[in-house]
Amino acid sequence: MLSVTLIVLSFQGSFVGVNAEIGPIAPPNTQSPRDTYNAFMTNMDQAYELVIEGYRQSKQEPGLFQSAEVKKQAARAEKAMERAIGTLNLQEVSPVIQKNTNIESALLLREILDRIEKPRPEDIPDLEAVKTEGIKRWEIPNTAIAIVQISDEGWYKNEFRFSLFSEETLKRLELWYGEVKHLPYQEGALEGFYEYYISTPGSLLPPKWSKLLPGWSKKTFWDQTIWQWGSLLLLLSLASAMVGFIYRELRSPRNQANSKVQAWEGLILPTSIVAICFVSKYMVTNIINITGSTCVTIVLVLETILYCALAWLSFMFFNAVGRTIIASSYFDENHLLEATIVRNAFRIWGVVTGASLLYLGGNEIGIPTQALVASLGVGGLAISFGVQPYLKNLVGGITLFAHRSAKIGEFCEFGGVTGTIEDIGLNTTSVRTLGGSLVIIPNSVVSETQVVNYSRCERRLMNFTIGLRYETERQQLLDVMDKIRSWLEQHSMIVDERVRFIDFGDSSLDIEVFAYVMTTSYAEFLEIKETCLIEIIKIVEAVGTEFAFPSQTLYFSRDRAAGGGDRATASKPGQ
C-alpha cells in the first residue's frame, strides 16, 4: 500500500511540511501531554514525507547507488524519526537494541494511532492544565495508551518537561497492533509505513538494489519476509563456517615449539569472533533489517558473544605481552622466579580487564550487573569463608616470591616431597619427583613448611660407611684407608675428605668416608659418588680383603666340671 502512495505522491509533487524542517539538534517539546502527542505526530509525519521525497528522487536517478542528495534526504528523515522517538520512555530498553526497537516502537505506535479515533486537541491537557490540575498521567480516550510524567525532582519538578509515552505502553504495542491492524486507516494516516519498513532492507529509506528482489521473496513468514530469512540463514552459516575454519587452522601443529608465537596466535580466534559479531550485527540490523523479537534475540546473542570474546581477547593479549617479555634474554635460568612473577602479573591484569568488559557488557545487554555486584556485599561474609583457602594460597605464593626460597628448575624438598620445581603459580607449586610423578602443592603448605633447597648448596656432602671382614689384618685395614684417602685427595671435585676407622660392628670393621663434592647438580654428585664407590671396590680387592656381611660363628669346647668330669659348653663370641 505504501508503494501506491509513493507513486501517487511522486506524480503530485506536493509534500506538506517537507520544508518546514525543525532545527537538526532541537529536542521534541514534551512539557505537557498535548506537546508530547503533537511532537510525536508531527515528527512522524515529517519523517514519512522525507522518505517519500527521497524515494521519488532515488527512483528518477539511474544506477544502483543513491546520490548525495538522496542520502541527505534520508539523513533528514532519520533526524525527524529521532525526534519522534524522543517522546518515548525507553529507559528500560537495553542500549544494544535501542536503535532498531526504537524505530519499530515509533512506527507501531503510529500505526495504532492511525487506526483509532484521534483525540480532539482541546481534550489533551496542555501545560496550563497540568500546572493547575496537577496531572501526572493522561490516557488517550478509550485506550490504555498513556503519557506520564517522568521527572519529579530537580529543575523540572511538577512540570511535564519529560512527559513521555509510558513504558507499559511500549511493552504492549505489538499486542495492541494485532488487535487493531484489521481496522481501516483514519484520515491523515501514514498508510503502510510500518509494513514497508519491516519488509525492506536498510533503514528508513531502502537502498536501490532492493527493487531487484523478486516479488515472491517479499512474502511475510513469521514476521519476516522470505528473503530476510534466507539472508539471515546464509549470514549465520558463513559466520559459523569462518569461525570453524579459523579454529581448525590454529589447531595445526605449526609453531608448537615457540610459546611466544603461540601466545600471539591465541589472539587470532577471539579477534575473528569479535569482527564477525560486529559484521553480523551490522548486516542483521542495517542491511537485512531483521525486526521484532527475532531481531532482539539475535542482537542479544551476538552482543553476548561479542563481549565474551572481548574479555577472552583481553586476557589473551596480556598473556601474550607477558610471554613476549619473559622470552627476552634477561629472563634466563637465574631469573626464572622473576619470569613467573611477570607472567602471573599480566595474567591477573588480563583477568581484571576481562571481568571489567563483562561487567560493561552486562550493563549494555541489560543484565543487572550493578545489582549483582551489590548483592555480593550482602553475601560477602559467606563468600569470604569460601575463598579463604584461595586467599591463603595466594598469600603463600606472594610469600614464596618475596622470600625467593625456591625457583623454577631447582631441586627442593617441601614437607617430605622431594623433586624439581616445574612451576610456581600464585595458588600452587608443581614439583616433579624423582619417580616422575607431578605433585601439586598448595602455596599455603609451601609457605608454612620447611623448604630444603638442594640446588643452592655450594657443595654436597658425601658420607657413607663401609665394613670389612673381621679376618682383615691390621695392615690391610690401614692400606685400605690410605688408598681411599689418597684417591679422594687427588680428585679435583672433592674437598675436606676424611677416612677413619670408627667402630667394631656386629659383623664388620667399620670405616667412615666423609667428603664434600664441589657441585650443585644432584646428577653430577651421584655420578662422582658412583665413581668413588667403584674405586673403593677396586682398592679392597687389590689389598686382599673383602667386604663384610652379617654372619654368626659358633665355637664348641669342653670345660672341666667341679666334680672332675667334663661338661660340654658353647660360646658365642660374635664371630
Image (cartoon, rainbow, N blue to C red):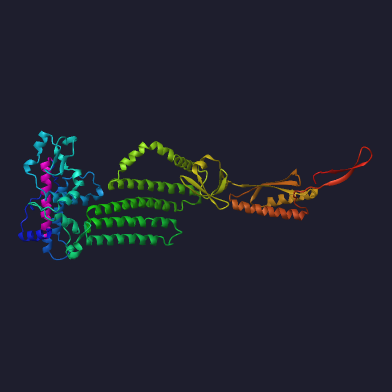
Quadrant containing the N terminus is bottom left
Question: Is residue 398 or residue 152 the one in the foreground?
Answer: 152
Answer with left or right where residue 420 lies relative to residue 142: right
Q: Residue at x 9, y 39 (%)?
A: 126
Q: Quadrant of residue 383?
A: top left
User: Can you say whether 235 is above or below 24 in the image?
Assistant: below
On the image, the x and y values in percent for residue 47 come to 12, 52
Q: Is residue 468 above or below residue 219?
A: above
Residue drawn at (27%, 57%) of the image? 280
User: Is 167 within the magenta?
Assistant: no
Query: Based on the displayed image, in which of its 4 quarters is residue 247 positioned?
Result: bottom left
Q: Is residue 142 left or right of residue 405?
A: left
Magenta span: 31-55
- Asked if residue 213 can be seen in this view, the reply is no
Question: Residue 92 at x, y = what percent?
Answer: 23, 44
Q: Position of residue 146 (x, y in %)?
A: 15, 42
Q: Is residue 39 magenta?
A: yes
Residue at horizontal 25 percent and vertical 50 percent from the top:
96
Residue 376 lies in quadrant: top left
Main SS of the magenta part reads helix
| Image spot of residue 550 (x, y percent) | 75, 48
